[in-house]
Amino acid sequence: MKVAKITLITIMVGLILAGCCGPKQAKIEEAPLLPCSAPRMVSSEQQFPGGQVINLTKLAPSQVVLNEPFKYSLKVENLTDRELLNVVVTDAKPAHMKINRSDPEFEEVEGELRWELGSLAANDYKIIAINAVALETGAIVTCAEVTYDTPTCAQIDIVRSKLKLVKEVPSESLKCNRIPISYTITNEGDAYACDISIEDELPGGMLTSEGDDRVSFSIDNLGPGESREFKTVVDAMEVGAYASSAVAIARSGGKITSNIPETIVTQPVLMISETCPASQRIGRSLTYEIMVSNKGDGIAEGAVVVASIPDHTQFKSSSGGGVYTHSSPGQVTWEIGDMQPNSSKIVTMKLTLDEPGTLVTTATAKAFCAEPVSDSCRTELSGIPAILLEVVDVSDPIEVGEVETYVITVTNQGTAVDNDIVIIGFLEDNMEYISASGPTEASFSDGKVSFAPLEMLEPKGRATWRVNIKATGEGDIRFKTTMNSAQLGRDVVETEATRFYK
């Protein structure tokens, strides 16, 4: 504490401060500090006593009338550019003078008048106004004193880091796509955040590319206003909704939690159905209808349908832009494009086959991120048997007593096999049975030559039988032949005329 004294005459009192006006900030040459090292220490110093600091002026009348009130004042001035603290003014109270009042109020302590003025701002002043009365004649001599504090101060800035963590994911993703995740951490405070760790415990069914169920990063330091972004990709094992929050922990920044974004993982599910005639005659057009559907909850990107065309089958046409490729086997390809969930597409193709048998085609649908699916369709193709019966005599006319040969020929002119072909020859009078030959055995009874059934005759196939007879009398003779089969259902009759003569 510093003390200045003045008498009744105006006296300037002060203490000398180092450098005249206040404390010095010491300059310390130090190496640059790392962001997260301990803060630098700064010193403040002040030297006492000092130069002109405070001025105390007493203003009083040179004489007063006995027992009549008079006024005098004390002016306290701060001559520096810094605040003075705990300013106290005291003034001695003569025995033959009475103090009626003062502004501010005074306190009488051990015969002294005391004014506690508190702080006095830089280059400011305060005035004490006093009302008194002289009780005796003579001279009044008083001495006033002022005391004050000039503190030595140090400023310590209070700062803090303030972290913000934002997690970003796509709102939707196909199951077979990798899901990108980004984490952005920002320091919104005014101090460095140090030793930061970021961790995201992934929801069940989601793994990193290394097969881990959590994502973690670390940062040595993050300056005020600075941001850092981290990116990774993860895989979803199943369709569904996936959401989690990330947590960041700093040495002095506490623990913060990110937002909780959600990714809906979807997958297309293809279904295919192929329909066709169950049976058809060969050579006729066959229409195949193929319907492909997306029954999943994800888009089937780049859907393609391919239908096989067996060998020996003729492609006629297709709908929906199907492209025919001739190979072994051939195929028709439809570029369907993207298929939305719960959508369907129908395409058709027309084929023909000139051979009997079973025609099987298989249609397969494929799309990105969807399991391929297939369906087959079977058509039984049949032909029509058409057998021709021809009977000719080798010699005409023939002399009685000679042998005539009748050639019986059956030709399958159709497109299907005929079965159980039965040939019977009938002899008239003047005809004597000699023998018969052919692909089946013959028997003769009561003027009738019967051949055992021919089990099968292929399309374009031919079978020939021969019957030898002897002419026993003259005349216009007829050799009648009948034919029946499994497909015919009733007899075909053919008669050959031969002239017998003597």
Image (tube, grey):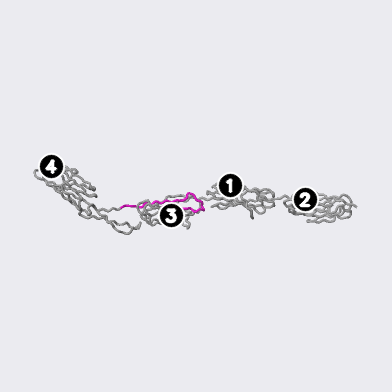
Tell me the crowding category of disc 4: few under 14, some 14 to 19, or many 20 or more residues within 10 angstroms, Cα based: some
Kind of residue at badge 4: Val
In magenta segment, residue 161: yes
Residue 133: which disc?
4
Task: Specify few, some or many for label 3: CA neighbours under 10 Å numbering under 14, 14-19, or 20 or more.
Answer: some
Q: Which mark is on residue 345?
A: 1
Q: Amino acid at mark 3?
A: Phe
Q: Are marks 1 and 2 in contact (CB under 8 Å)?
A: no
Q: Local crowd at mark 2 within 10 Å, few (<14), some, or many (≥20)?
A: some
Q: Amino acid at mark 2?
A: Leu
| Residue 320 image point, x, y percent | 60, 47
Q: Residue tagged by mark 2?
A: 388
Lower position in the chain sequence, tag 1 or tag 4:
4
First in sequence, mark 4 or 2: give its number: 4
Task: Report, in whole angstroms, how far the alpha carbon at label 3 lies from the one at label 1.
Answer: 43 Å
Q: Mark 2: which secondary structure?
A: strand
Helix, strand or loop under label 1: strand
Span highlighted in magenta in the image? 157-184
- In the displayed image of the protein, which residue is found farthest to the left? 137
Q: Is residue 319 visible?
A: yes
Check contact, mark 3 vs mark 4: CB within 8 A.
no
Number of numbered discs overlaid on the protein picture: 4
Q: Which numbered disc, 3 or 1, marks the residue that appears first in the sequence?
A: 3
Residue holding disc 3: 230
